Image (tube, helix red, strand yellow):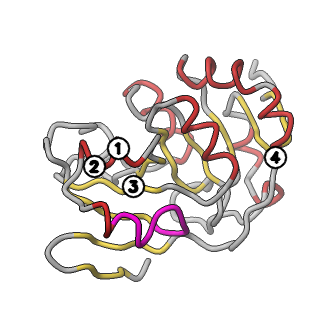
Amino acid sequence: MSKEPKHYDIEEAFRNSDKLIEEMKKGKIFLYPTDTVYGIGCDASNPECVKKIYEIKKRKEDKPLSVIAPNEEWILNNFKISKPVLRLYLPGPYTLLVEKKDPAFLRHLSPNNRLGIRIPEHSFTLLVMKAGIPFVTTSANLSGKEAPSSLEEVEEEIVKKVDYVIEGPCFLGKPSTLVEIDENIKEIKRS
């Protein structure tokens, strides 16, 4: 028998932030709004939880997942990117594809030497920052389906498999822009 997820609107989430942060660190799965589309995620440093995200989305595990960074220092310490370039894009509706300093770092999210990094311009991000952990961020859809721009568009099959639903608006209603960062900076069209 599956349990019903606990629902919080974004204001309730902040009033209960200590409890929710504890739950994030225990590996619970969250459905949440971002500045772009509705996301699904968990503690990115917990491989077992990450595996659940792949299962819920019915996504192949060789397809990389992105993370919401807990802060700017975390990005600068773990990835090959300069502060000025980082600040050009984040916070905002971008996913930066950046080379990891250590290719083994978060390998269960991305088997190659790059990882997608976000700092959504959304209040949910403040919970992640307060938790101080990298947090998986991927659209809350079944693999190959349209990314949901609101909670109402998230398929019931997904909602039933998460532990917490944070209710709130998404602002753009379309996926983040992918930007590859290396010697050159280039935007990538999503297919």
CA separation in Å, label 2 and label 4: 31 Å
Position above or below: 50 against 87: above
Which label is found at residue 117? 3
- Find disc 2 in the rendering and name its residue: 76
Residue 161, by quadrant, is top right
- Find disc 1 in the rendering and name its residue: 73
Position above or below: 150 against 127: below
- Find disc 4 in the rendering and name its residue: 167
Please name the residue shown 68% across and 73% down the image: 172
Is residue 87 highlighted in magenta? Answer: yes
Residue 167 picture location, percent across and down: 81, 46
Q: Nearer the viewer, mark 4 or mark 3?
A: 3
- Judging from the image, what secondary structure is the residue with disc 2 in? helix
Q: Which residues are magenta?
A: 86-94
Please name the residue shown 29% across and 82% down the image: 186
Residue 97 picture location, percent across and down: 31, 63
